[in-house]
Amino acid sequence: MILAHRVSLPCLTLTSKTSTTPFLYRKSLVCSSIFRCDYGSRACVKCSCTENGDTQQSYFQGFSVLGPEPDVPFDSKTMWSTLSFYLFSVHIPLSFGGLSIVAHVLHQSVLDPQTEALSLLAIQLIELVAAVCLLQTTMKPQFKLMGIFKVDKLPTDRSPWLGSAVGFSSLVLLVFLSSFLTDSFIGPKSINNSVLKEILTSTNLARAACTLAYCLIIPTLEELMYRGFLLRSISSTMKWQQSIFLSSVIFSAIHFSGENFLQLFIIGCVLGCSYCWTGDLRSSILIHSLYNAMILSITYVS
């Protein structure tokens, strides 16, 4: 569950729950000044462009550390059926019907803020446990569940902390830029945020439960399913750019928020790039958590 935020108004959407530039650039190779051209300056220019282009292509190919099919914990042939089962049997029933069930059991037409916050936390914990059990039963026998969080044999220069710092900075910049452009072309739009605002300003227990749900449970759940499972599975059958695009579209669509689709897509791309570059799911979880914490803080003080 990503908390969507518009620049023009400091508010966010409480939903049922980006492609960014590479983090590090290598210098391109060019023809050395001591390189002798037997075919004139035109040949030198051609050589420079060819080596420069090959280097850039090699870098983009090496951007992602996610491995081929043998290194993926899940079978790509059953990946879509597993995702469908999770969405229609776990995610949608709990996310869109969980609070209604709680209200029905408690015989309340409207839940008070503290009960709603505690119920949200409990529902997300149940969904996280269900998702972990599902992944545990569908992954290949030779892999362990903790292997989802970190790719084996990572390059020493792929620091998850660097990826988190650059990823979070890029995410904030891109989201605010997209919100600004949207407001410029479409016009500012007020987003109803009264429910979340009421929870955050009610009791300390409600505020703690809401923070725990949005900044720990939900980021872990969504990154586990949409990056650790979905993105890693499809990256074994297509280029990393295509896999990030496809997983981000699915991630955005699952939130069922048409007005925030572009913003959620950008967020998905940034989180996907962070996971591909670092190979460490903790990096994208940290970015996700920091972003939600930032939006919660803006909502609380607005």
Image: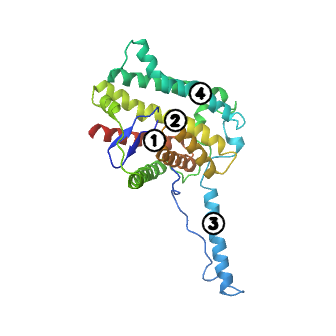
Q: Residues within 10 Å of mark 4 (few under 14, many from 20)?
A: few
The residue that label 3 is drawn on is: 55
Name above or below for residue 211 compared with residue 157.
Answer: above
Which quadrant holds residue 146?
top right
Q: Residues within 10 Å of mark 1 (few under 14, many from 20)?
A: many
The residue that label 1 is drawn on is: 288
Label 1 and label 3: CA atoms lie apart by: 32 Å
Q: Residues within 10 Å of mark 2 (few under 14, many from 20)?
A: many
Q: Residue at x 32, y 21 (%)?
A: 112
Front disc: 2 or 4 = 4
Front disc: 3 or 4 = 4
Instruction: State if disc 1 and disc 2 touch (CB < 8 Å).
Output: yes
Q: Residue at x 54, y 51 (%)?
A: 158
Label 2 and label 3: CA atoms lie apart by: 35 Å
The residue that label 2 is drawn on is: 222
Front disc: 2 or 3 = 2
* Amino acid carrying mark 3 in the image: Thr
* Amino acid carrying mark 2 in the image: Glu
Query: Which one is earlier in the sequence, the residue at label 2 or at label 3?
Result: 3
